[in-house]
Image (cartoon, rainbow, N blue to C red):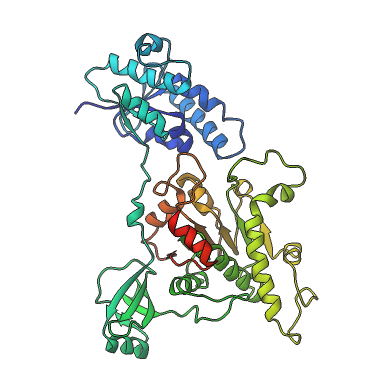
């Protein structure tokens, strides 16, 4: 079988440096213009900078095995080659204005196609416009979607089953049911609905015992001033309070309560129950709209604009808690009404940019990663590997609100994590459907 020739774009390499080795026994080409673009990122301290430096290390290691200009054979019998662009203008002058890097990249692919008439040359780019232009000049163009999942088929975390009332009564009496309903994932929830009156009972599947049990971790009580308003939020609280579940993912549209539930459960277990030593909250730093530019002040002051949604949710929780505390109750920090600054000052809560989490080991902590849909699969792996002994990690996000170029609802780190980890007993997931922020917010989430 004739080997294919894959020509890789900059965004593919920056997205995942391992993409160099992801094409099996085929021929991988990196145009020199792409090396120059990657070089522009190498001094950055963010994920792009780290990936750019890793690409340089990979290619430099390959040089020890041969000439990149002629092509170096890899361990999986493929070939990786760096191609110069000195003849591009002769090849593509009739179809492209070769004064942009994208067009130089496409021109290189055209040059390779002319020199290898018997091979299938494929342009690989995460930029839709590059793929469109490549297709327009007669090249095969593909997206790099090794980690892509079908979002419409994404695991929901629960299933609805209609049953007879007798079965509901048996479940409530015996507090378990043998699984005669089909295949379930570990920690998947089942919503048993009475066929006649639409009453329902929630259960959770145990893959160890092959049976379904009632929810034991959450019974509808208030946690830090709030309680669940719908079945999905009840499932979410049950996972968040279960010490055996080390990774919880909550996916849902705006206003479904993902972040608020995670913060309430975290504060309850850190402050009230002392199960974890600290609540760590972080989110990717990526602005909606025009960036604010460089901000003066300390790390905390620079981080404040991006953490404002977290502050808003914290204030809601603390306001509810202070309003419901009786004057005879014990005081925290010597105060009847505590403020967010009190929890921050005493070390119960730490707000940390994701930039500074890399390289850390975080044991015995409750970690919330908000807006996790703005992470790549590689970044998601980096974050999950930060979890130390007895740490619980919570991922929240809305796969339809992605601010990062070249990521979508099917290729972002949150969706990929949900899909890849759904078979693990340490992991639980719930998709929240009903908006609870306000009627207006729910209306906007439905129609826009």
In terms of image quadrants, where is residue 368? bottom right
Between 125 and 184, the residue placed more toward the observer is 125
Between 296 and 238, the residue placed more toward the observer is 296
Q: Quadrant of the N terminus?
A: top left
Across and down, in percent, residue 218 comes to 50, 78
Between 267 and 89, the residue placed more toward the observer is 89
Residue 352 seen from this side:
no
Q: Residue at x 33, y 51 (%)?
A: 150
Taking the view exactly as shown, the residue that stands out farthest to the right is: 334
Residue 204 seen from this side:
yes
Q: Residue at x 43, y 26 (%)?
A: 62
- Left or right of 340 on screen, residue 34: left
Across and down, in percent, residue 178 comes to 28, 80
Q: Residue at x 73, y 62 (%)?
A: 344
In terms of image quadrants, where is residue 168? bottom left
Q: Residue at x 60, y 61 (%)?
A: 363
Query: Relative to residue 152, is residue 379 depicted above or below?
Result: above
Q: How many marks?
A: 0
Query: Relative to residue 111, is residue 207 depicted above or below?
Result: below
Across and down, in percent, residue 377 comes to 45, 47
In terms of image quadrants, where is residue 102? top left
- Left or right of 6 on screen, residue 104: right
Query: Relative to residue 104, is residue 56 depicted above or below?
Result: below
Across and down, in percent, residue 341 comes to 75, 63
- Left or right of 425 on screen, residue 387: right
């Amino acid at each position: 079988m004739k080997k294919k020739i894959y020509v890789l774009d900059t965004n593919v390499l920056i997205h995942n440096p391992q993409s160099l080795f992801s094409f099996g026994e085929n021929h991988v080409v990196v145009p020199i213009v792409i090396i120059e673009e990657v070089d522009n990122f190498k001094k950055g301290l963010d994920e792009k900078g780290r990936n750019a430096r890793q690409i340089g290390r990979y290619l430099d290691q390959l040089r020890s095995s041969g000439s990149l200009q002629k092509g170096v054979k890899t361990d999986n019998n493929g070939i990786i080659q760096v191609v110069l662009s000195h003849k591009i203008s002769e090849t593509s002058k009739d179809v492209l204005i070769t004064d942009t890097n994208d067009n130089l990249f496409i021109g290189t692919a055209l040059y390779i196609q002319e020199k290898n008439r018997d091979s299938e040359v494929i342009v690989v780019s995460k930029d839709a416009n590059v793929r469109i232009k490549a297709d327009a000049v007669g090249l095969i163009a593909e997206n790099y979607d090794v980690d892509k999942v079908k979002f419409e088929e994404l695991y929901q975390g629960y299933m609805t089953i209609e049953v007879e009332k007798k079965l509901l009564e048996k479940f409530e009496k015996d507090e378990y049911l043998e699984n005669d309903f089909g295949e379930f994932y570990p920690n998947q929830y089942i919503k048993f609905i009475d066929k006649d009156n639409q009453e329902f009972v929630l259960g959770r599947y145990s893959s160890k015992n092959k049976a379904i049990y009632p929810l034991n971790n959450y019974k509808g009580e208030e946690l830090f001033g709030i309680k669940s308003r719908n079945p999905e939020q009840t499932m979410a609280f049950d996972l968040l309070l279960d010490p055996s579940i080390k990774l919880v993912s909550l996916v849902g549209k705006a206003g479904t309560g993902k972040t608020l539930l995670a913060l309430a459960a975290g504060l309850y277990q850190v402050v009230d129950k002392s199960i974890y030593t600290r609540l760590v909250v972080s989110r990717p730093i990526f602005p909606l709209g025009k960036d604010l530019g460089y901000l003066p002040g300390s790390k905390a002051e620079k981080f404040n604009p991006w953490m404002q949604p977290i502050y808003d949710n914290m204030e809601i929780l603390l306001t509810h808690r202070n309003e419901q505390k009786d004057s005879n109750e014990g005081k925290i920090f010597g105060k009847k009404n505590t403020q967010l600054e009190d929890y921050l000052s005493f070390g119960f809560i730490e707000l940390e940019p994701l930039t500074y989490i890399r390289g850390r080991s975080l044991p015995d902590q409750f970690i919330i990663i908000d807006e996790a849909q703005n992470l790549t699969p590689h970044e998601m792996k980096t974050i999950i590997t930060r979890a130390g002994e007895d740490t619980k990690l919570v991922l929240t996000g809305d796969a339809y609100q992605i601010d990062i170029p070249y990521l979508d609802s099917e290729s972002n780190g949150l969706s990929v994590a949900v899909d890849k980890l759904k078979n693990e007993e340490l992991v639980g997931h719930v998709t929240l459907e009903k908006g609870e922020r306000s009627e207006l917010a729910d209306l906007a989430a439905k129609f826009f």
